[in-house]
Image (spheres, rainbow, N blue to C red):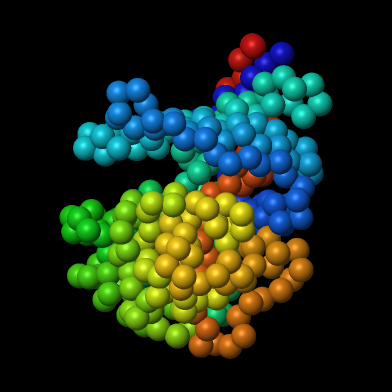
C-alpha cells in the first residue's frame, strides 16, 4: 500500500475556488438529503489549558468517501505568527478501508469554508450586488474575498478589523485583486453601511454587528463563531433575516447567534427557513423581494471536507501532485 501526502501548496493547486464552490453544492445537497453520516464534532481541551483538540469523522455515500479531520486549536500561536488552527484530514479507501491520503486540513478548511459562503451568496445575494464588507481580515477574509468575487461582480470591498494594522496590511495586499478596490473602514458600522454582501469572519465572542446597521436587501454570511457561546451578530439581526443554515440540527444547538435568539424567545426553531442543501436540491430561493435581508449561518461540516478531499485527490492523481510513500 502507499499513502499520498498532500501539503498546503498541493491543496491550493488541486482545489481551485470556482471548482470547490460547485463541489460544495454537491456536498450540501447530500447533507440535506441524508446521504452523509456525520456525528457532532468532538472538541476537547488540551491538558495544559493552552488550546483544544477537535475530531470530525464522517462518511459520504456518493461519491463514496470516509475519513476524519483532526485539528489543534492553539490561540497562543497568533502572537508568534503561527497558524492558530492546524491539522490533517485522513481519508480512507472506500473499498478496502486502508488509509489512502493525509491532506493538510487548514488549507482545505480555508478554501471549502469560503466556497460554501460563495455558494450561499450565489443562491441568496441579489444579482446586482457590487459592494462587499469583510468583518475580519485573517485567513478566512482572504478566502472569502476570492469566493465572493467568484460569484458576484464586486467593485468595492470595505474591510474592518479590531486591529487597525492588520486591516491596513490586508487592504495593501489585496487592493486591485479581482478587479475591485479594497479599502479599510474605521468602524464595523461604516464597513457594512449600504453594503450588498457582508461576511463576518472574526474570532469574536460577542456581537460585532447590530441588526439596525444592516440595509434592506443585504446578504450576510456568518462564519466566525462555531459554538453556542460565541456570536458575531445580535439577536435583532437574526430576527430580521431570512435565515438559512448548513445543518438545521447543529445550528439549533451550536450556532451562538441562533442559540441566543432562541433562548431569548425572539425566534422559534421554525425561523430557520431552510438548509443550504435544500436550496440546491430543490432549486428553491427563500428571497421574496429585493428588500429581504438574507443570512447564511455557517458552522462547518465534515461532509464539506470529504467532498473537498475527493476533488483534491482526483486532481492530485491527474496532475501528479503530492508525495506517495509506502504505508
Name above or below for residue 94 compared with residue 60: above
User: Image quadrant for the N terminus?
Assistant: top right
Residue at position x 32%, y 63% in the image: 207
Q: Is residue 94 left or right of residue 267?
A: right
Q: Is residue 238 above or below residue 42?
A: below
Asked whether residue 141 appears in the rendered view, the answer is: no
Q: Is residue 195 above or below residue 222?
A: below
What's the residue at 21%, 37% (across, down)? 79
**Residue shown at 20% from the left, 70% from the top:** 186
Q: Residue at x 70, y 33 (%)?
A: 66
Residue 307 shows in the view: yes
Q: Position of residue 265 (x, y in %)?
A: 46, 70
Between 212 and 67, the one nearer to me in the picture: 212
Residue 139 percent location from the top left of the image? 38, 49
In the image, 153 versus 138, the foreground residue is 138
The quadrant in which residue 122 appears is bottom right
User: Eyeballing the image, is 82 above or below 201?
Assistant: above
The picture places residue 25, in percent across and down from the top left corner, at: 67, 57
121 vs 256, left or right, is right
Image quarter hosting the C terminus: top right
Query: Seen from this angle, which residue lies furthest top?
Result: 326
302 and 99: which is toward the camera: 302
Number of marks in picture: 0
Q: Position of residue 261 (x, y in %)?
A: 45, 67
Amino acid at each position: 500500500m502507499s499513502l499520498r501526502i498532500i501539503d498546503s501548496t498541493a491543496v491550493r493547486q488541486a482545489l481551485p475556488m470556482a471548482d470547490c464552490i460547485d463541489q460544495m453544492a454537491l456536498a450540501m445537497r447530500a447533507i440535506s438529503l441524508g446521504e452523509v453520516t456525520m456525528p457532532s464534532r468532538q472538541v476537547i481541551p488540551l491538558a495544559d489549558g493552552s488550546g483544544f483538540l477537535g475530531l470530525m469523522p464522517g462518511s459520504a455515500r456518493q461519491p463514496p468517501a470516509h475519513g476524519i479531520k483532526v485539528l489543534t486549536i492553539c490561540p497562543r500561536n497568533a502572537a508568534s505568527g503561527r497558524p492558530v488552527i492546524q491539522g490533517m484530514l485522513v481519508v480512507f479507501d472506500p473499498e478496502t478501508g486502508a488509509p489512502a491520503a493525509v491532506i493538510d486540513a487548514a488549507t482545505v478548511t480555508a478554501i471549502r469554508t469560503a466556497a460554501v459562503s460563495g455558494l450561499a451568496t450565489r443562491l441568496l445575494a441579489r444579482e446586482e450586488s457590487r459592494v462587499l464588507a469583510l468583518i475580519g481580515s485573517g485567513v478566512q477574509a482572504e478566502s472569502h474575498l476570492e469566493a465572493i468575487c467568484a460569484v458576484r461582480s464586486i467593485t468595492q470591498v470595505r474591510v474592518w478589523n479590531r486591529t487597525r494594522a492588520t486591516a491596513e496590511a490586508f487592504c495593501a495586499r489585496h487592493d486591485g485583486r479581482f478587479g475591485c478596490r479594497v479599502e479599510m473602514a474605521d468602524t464595523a458600522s461604516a464597513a457594512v453601511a449600504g453594503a450588498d454582501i457582508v461576511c463576518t469572519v472574526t474570532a469574536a465572542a460577542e456581537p460585532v454587528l447590530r441588526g439596525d446597521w444592516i440595509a434592506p436587501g443585504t446578504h450576510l454570511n456568518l462564519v466566525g463563531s462555531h459554538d453556542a457561546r460565541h456570536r458575531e451578530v445580535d439577536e435583532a439581526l437574526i430576527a430580521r433575516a431570512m435565515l438559512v443554515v448548513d445543518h438545521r440540527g447543529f445550528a439549533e444547538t451550536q450556532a451562538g447567534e441562533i442559540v441566543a435568539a432562541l433562548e431569548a424567545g425572539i425566534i422559534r426553531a421554525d425561523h430557520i427557513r431552510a438548509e443550504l442543501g435544500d436550496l440546491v436540491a430543490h432549486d428553491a430561493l427563500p428571497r421574496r423581494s429585493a428588500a429581504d435581508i438574507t443570512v447564511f449561518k455557517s458552522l462547518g461540516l465534515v461532509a464539506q471536507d470529504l467532498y473537498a478531499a475527493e476533488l483534491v485527490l482526483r486532481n492530485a492523481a491527474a496532475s501528479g501532485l503530492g508525495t506517495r510513500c509506502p504505508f
